[in-house]
Image: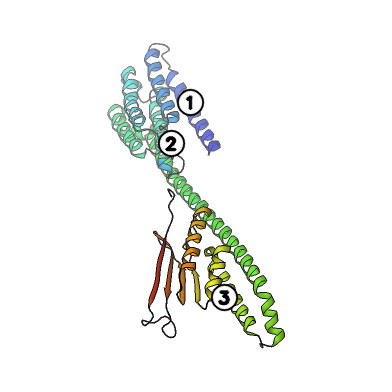
Amino acid sequence: MRSVRRVFDTIALAFTAYFAVRGLVRPEGVAHLPLAIVAVSLYLVLTLIALYVEQAREPGDGSGPPRERAGTVLPQWAAFAVLAGTALIPLLVSAYTPPGERTASHATWYLGAVGAVLTIVCARHRPVHAWIGIGVLAVESSLTIGLGPALGLGLVGSAVWVAIAQLLMIFTDRAYRDTARLAALQQATSAWQATQAVRRLERRRRVQYALAVAGPILSRVIAADGELTDEERTTARLAEGRLRDELRGALLLDDDVREAIAAARLRGATVTVFDEGGLDDLPPEHLDSVRHELADTLRQTDAARIIIRAAPDPDVAITIVGRSPGGEGLTEEDDLQLWREVPRPTAAS
């Protein structure tokens, strides 16, 4: 963007120098040179204002749409100042130019000069001011030299340059928005891929852990062809439950919670664990607090059926439901023994 700005500034300054020379070179010599210097000096000041005056920078500049970024938008006061100055230049030139010479090259330089300044104004996201300036220029030049001569001596070119600047501004802004949108999509895609990679790694780690725990008893089941002792059956049941917990429990589990779940199963309880992503955004210290409350709750209940669920909720981290046996499955006949909602820790806590 800086290289484009430098090229733009170089072209603008080159045109400025050209029109300034045209305004100062006069066939009658120095008769009206002081007034010509005043008009050209005003033109140079307006060009510098249009090129280099910038918006006051505010927090967040550079991240918003192109119209809102400091450095690209000409300030409102500067746009009005340039508009007033460009309206004054044709009047000054006409004032010191004899009526018979007002269509000469040295007397119509303002048509191209004002158009160049207004082109810069339009390129800096002030198209309304630029077109108002073109309208004022058309009226003043028509009153001074006539509409036909004004159109042929530079008025059409000035309007065309402003139109081209506005088209370039529109296309550039659209390209900027598309590029910003593409960059945001790429960042989101990269973040999603990184998240998925972490989740795959976590699942793989949990499966490896569960298999390390359940592997020996599974080997024993295969070797004994299913003929196990009561103690081995209990071990197999606990291993099967732990395997399911590792696959479905995700962030709910730590060593303390695993021990509490195993103790509940050893006394004959059925424990079901569901992690539905409700803990994904909690920092490690808050996860430890939630798990600690979960383990304490499991140790204090004697419910026969325990369901642990971590669902996305703004207030509740974990819901623990305990029921006494009442037939197959969770039916209306079951008696509710435990209903515990572990609140979601906040940053302040």
* Residue 266: % across, % down: 55, 76
Amino acid bearing label 3: Gly
**Of discs 1 and 2, which sits in the foreground?**
2
* Residue 91: % across, % down: 31, 23
Residue bearing mark 1: 18
- What is the distance, in whole Å, between disc 1 and disc 2 at their CAs? 30 Å
The residue sitting at 48% across, 26% down in the picture is: 18
The residue sitting at 29% across, 26% down in the picture is: 144
**Of discs 1 and 3, which sits in the foreground?**
3
- What is the distance, in whole Å, between disc 2 and disc 3 at their CAs? 61 Å
Q: Which mark is residue 241?
A: 3
CB within 8 Å, label 1 to label 3? no
* Residue 137: % across, % down: 32, 31
Q: Earlier in the sequence, mark 1 or mark 3?
A: 1
Label 3: state its secondary structure: helix
Residue bearing mark 2: 70
Q: Earlier in the sequence, mark 1 or mark 2?
A: 1
How many other residues sit within 10 Å of disc 1, few (<14), some (14-19) or many (≥20)?
some
* Residue 257: % across, % down: 54, 65
